[in-house]
Amino acid sequence: MAKMTNAYDLPARKVIHTVGPKYAVKYHTAAENALSHCYRSCLELLIENGLESIAMGCIYTEAKNYPREPAAHVAIRTVRRFLEKQKGKIAGVIFCITSSSDTEIYKRLLPLYFPRDKQEEETAVSKLPADVGDENGETVIDERKIRIRPLPAGAADRTVATAPLDLPLESGLASRSTFKLDSYLDPSFMSLIKDPDLRRKEQWGKSSQAQKRFNYARLLGYGDIGFPPLSAAEEYSLHSRYLAKANSLNLSEIAEMKIIYRGGVDSEGRPVMVVVGAHFLLRCLDLERFVLHVVKEFEPLIQKPYTIVYLHSAASLQPQPDLGFMKRIQQILGRKHQRNLHGIYILHPTLGLRTAILGMQLLIDGEVWKKVVYVDRLVQLFRYVPREQLTIPDFVFQHDLEVNGGRGMIV
C-alpha cells in the first residue's frame, strides 16, 4: 500500500511513501504483483488528491534481493497500463534513477513499452517478454485464468436463455495508423500471448515431430538436439527467468572452479570472456547451477559486442558436454548473445573438437559457430587478445610447449 504526507520544506506538494516487497524465486509471481501494486497505489493516490505529475524512484532494492531488470519491467508496464486508463488526468511520470546500471536498463526498456515510431514498435514486438501482464500490469498465470469458449454449433438452440459472454481479445498487436499518445494507449496494448491451450498444443506438436524424426545427432553421440526452437519472446522470457534465479542464488562454488571468468579486452577493445575446458569437471558439476552461473556471468557482456576465448588445452582428458547441452545454453542466452558475439578463439583445438564444432554449425546455429577461429599456439592468440589482458592457468603454457615444441610460448 501507499500513504501520502505533506512535503513540508521539500520542493514538492506531497510525498508518497510505499515499501517494496522482498524477493524469492519460489514466490516470484507474488513479488511481481506486490511490486506492481506499490507503483499502482502511488498513482492512485496521485489521482485521488488532484495531482498531475509524480517522480518515482526504484521501489525495489538489492537489499531485498529483487533483480533489477525484471523489476524495471514491472515498474514500466504498470505505469503504462495505468496511463491507458487515466491518460487525461496525469501530465507526467518521471522515473528518477540514481545508478548507471538502472539508467541503462530503463533507457533500453522504455521504448519497448512506449514506442515512439513504427520502427520502435516493430522492435518491441520481438523483444517484449511473453508475459506483459493483465490490464493492471500484474503477472498472469495461464493455468489460473478462467477461459470461456463459445458454445458449439447447435447448443445455442437448446439453451433457453444465455448471458452475454465476455470473450478474450484475440492475440496479436492491434493495428494503429498513428503513433501519438492517444493511438498507442489502448487496452489491447501488446497482447502478444496466444491462447495458452493453443500454445501448449503447438509445443506438443513440435516436440512429437522432433521425436518421430530419426535422431542422427543422438546416434553419433552428440546428445538430443531435436527439441523445438523458441520464438524471440519465449527466448526473452526464458532468459529473464534464469537471470532472476541466478541473481537470487549464491553460486560461489561454481565461480571458484574457474570454468568461465572475465578477462580484459581484445585488440579492438571488446570485453573478453575466458572459458577453460580442462576445468569443466562433468562428473562433479551440478549442470543446472552451472547454467545459472553462465547466465549471470555473461549478462554484463552480451549487451555490447564481446569476444570468447576458449582454452582447450588438455581438455580432451575430461568428458565434455554434448551438443544438446550447448543448444540449451544458447537458447537461454538468447539472440542478443548471438548478435553481439564477435568471435570465438579456440586455443589448441583437437580433431574431436573440430568435428563437434562442425556438427554445431550444421545442426544448431551456423551464424554463431561460423565465428570460430582456431588458434594452435599462444603466440597466435596474443595477436587477437594481448597477453596482459588474459589470466591463463600455468598448465596451458606447459601444454603449449608440449604440443608445439620449440615454437611454444616460454614463460
Image: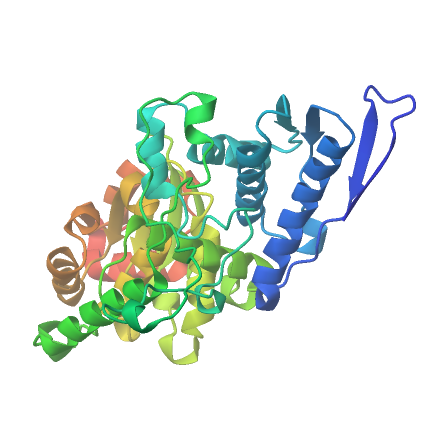
x 15%, y 67%: residue: 352
Asked if residue 71 shows in the view, the reply is: yes
272 or 187, nearer to the observer: 187
319 or 83, nearer to the observer: 83
User: What is the x, y in percent for residue 224?
Assistant: 21, 73
In the figure, residue 313 lies in which quadrant?
A: bottom left
Q: Is residue 319 above or below residue 43?
A: below
Asked if residue 61 shows in the view, the reply is: no
x 30%, y 49%: residue: 232
User: What is the x, y in percent for residue 166?
Assistant: 43, 55
Q: Is residue 90 above or below residue 213?
A: above
User: What is the x, y in percent for residue 39?
Assistant: 66, 42
191 or 114, nearer to the observer: 191
What colouring does the structure picture have?
A: rainbow
x 13%, y 62%: residue: 359
Number of numbered discs visible in the structure rendering? 0
Q: Is residue 121 above or below residue 398?
A: above
Q: Is residue 243 left or right of residue 304?
A: right
Q: Residue furthest right?
A: 8
In the figure, residue 97 lies in which quadrant?
A: top right
Q: Is residue 406 left or right of residue 358?
A: right
In the figure, residue 151 lies in which quadrant?
A: bottom left
User: What is the x, y in percent for residue 51?
Assistant: 74, 25
Q: Residue furthest front?
A: 160
x 28%, y 41%: residue: 339
